[in-house]
Image (spheres, grey):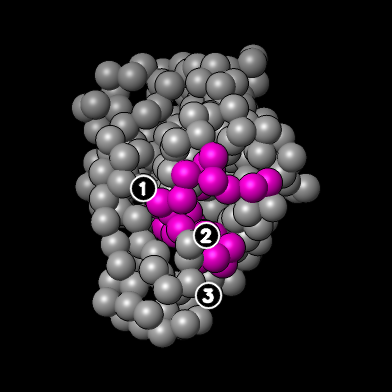
């Protein structure tokens, strides 16, 4: 699933259309069923922002498009007129560029869903104290790996950055919230912010634990492990040697 850094990169790419009056279409039948294209066609795009794992595109007249990419959705921006591959859910055409949204399960003219989100881990500066307050309000038996991915507690972190941030913080994804002190949480949240901010800037370093099962930990040499976690069975990756 695209995480917060992917959405922030998409928001940056879409800035080339801000200020333009757009031609909007939905080539995919399921995209047409949303009725989004008809409402947006001919309107001026006023702003684009990423909020957690959501994109909010604000058009004139107070119309807001929310896009959530779920597992496979993607936004691409390229010169207008390029041959399309497949049938996009949504196409936004400006004078020189067009944005194409593929495999987009959530396209809606309703942004209230973002009101229930926790602070965005990619905000500048990040609201670390508010995130810790939210995490402390969650059930103490909740494992850290699950807690960091609950969007109403902290917005933007997914499976990959959870794994990498907890490795940086030397904390196991299986440690219960009640067994972690505030400094443990702060280290993990600050690591997530730092790593994801670097990713938005195009500085994606080598993965330490994510999808590295059986390989030696670059810090202590112990073999990396993985196991499904929580009701969604998201795969947690961790080093049993130095993440406790």
Tell me whether circle 3 and circle 2 mark residues in contact (CB < 8 Å): no
The location of residue 26, given as percent across then percent down, is: 33, 30
The location of residue 15, given as percent across then percent down, is: 63, 46
Q: Of 61 and 204, which appears nearest the observer? A: 204
- Answer left or right for 33 relative to 101: left
Can you tell which quarter of the image residue 222 is in? bottom left
- At horizontal 58% and vertical 63% (from top left) the residue drawn is 169
- Answer left or right for 211 relative to 116: left
- Sooner in the amino-acid sequence: mark 2 or mark 1: 1
Boundaries of the magenta span: 155-182
Residue, disc 3 = 205
The tally of labels here is: 3
Circle on res. 171:
2
Residue 54 drawn above or below residue 97: above
Residue 207 drawn above or below residue 232: below
- At horizontal 30% and vertical 67% (from top left) the residue drawn is 225
- Answer left or right for 183 relative to 140: right
Instruction: Tell me the mark number nearer the camera, choosing from 3 and 2.
Output: 2
Residue 161 highlighted magenta (yes or no): yes
Residue 199 drawn above or below residue 25: below
């Amino acid at each position: 699933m695209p995480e917060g850094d992917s959405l922030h990169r998409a928001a940056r790419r879409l800035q080339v259309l801000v200020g333009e009056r757009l031609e909007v279409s939905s080539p995919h039948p399921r995209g047409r069923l949303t009725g989004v294209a008809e409402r947006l066609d001919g309107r001026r795009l006023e702003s684009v922002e990423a909020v957690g794992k959501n994109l909010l595109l604000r058009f004139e007249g107070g119309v807001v498009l929310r896009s959530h990419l779920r597992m496979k959705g993607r936004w691409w921006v390229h010169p207008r007129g390029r041959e399309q591959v497949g049938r996009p859910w949504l196409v936004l055409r400006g004078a020189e560029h067009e944005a194409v949204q593929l495999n987009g399960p959530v396209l809606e003219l309703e942004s209230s869903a973002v009101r229930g989100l926790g602070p965005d881990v990619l905000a500048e500066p990040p609201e670390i104290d508010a995130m810790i307050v939210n995490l402390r309000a969650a059930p103490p038996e909740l494992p850290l790996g699950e807690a960091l991915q609950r969007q109403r507690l902290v917005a933007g972190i997914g499976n990959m950055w959870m794994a990498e941030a907890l490795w940086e913080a030397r904390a196991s994804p299986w440690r219960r919230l009640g067994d972690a002190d505030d400094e443990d949480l702060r280290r993990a949240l600050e690591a997530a912010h730092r790593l994801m901010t670097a990713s938005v800037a195009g500085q994606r370093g080598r993965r330490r634990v994510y999808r590295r099962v059986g390989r030696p930990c670059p810090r202590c040499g112990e073999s990396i492990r993985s196991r499904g976690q929580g009701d969604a069975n998201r795969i947690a990756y961790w080093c049993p040697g130095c993440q406790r």
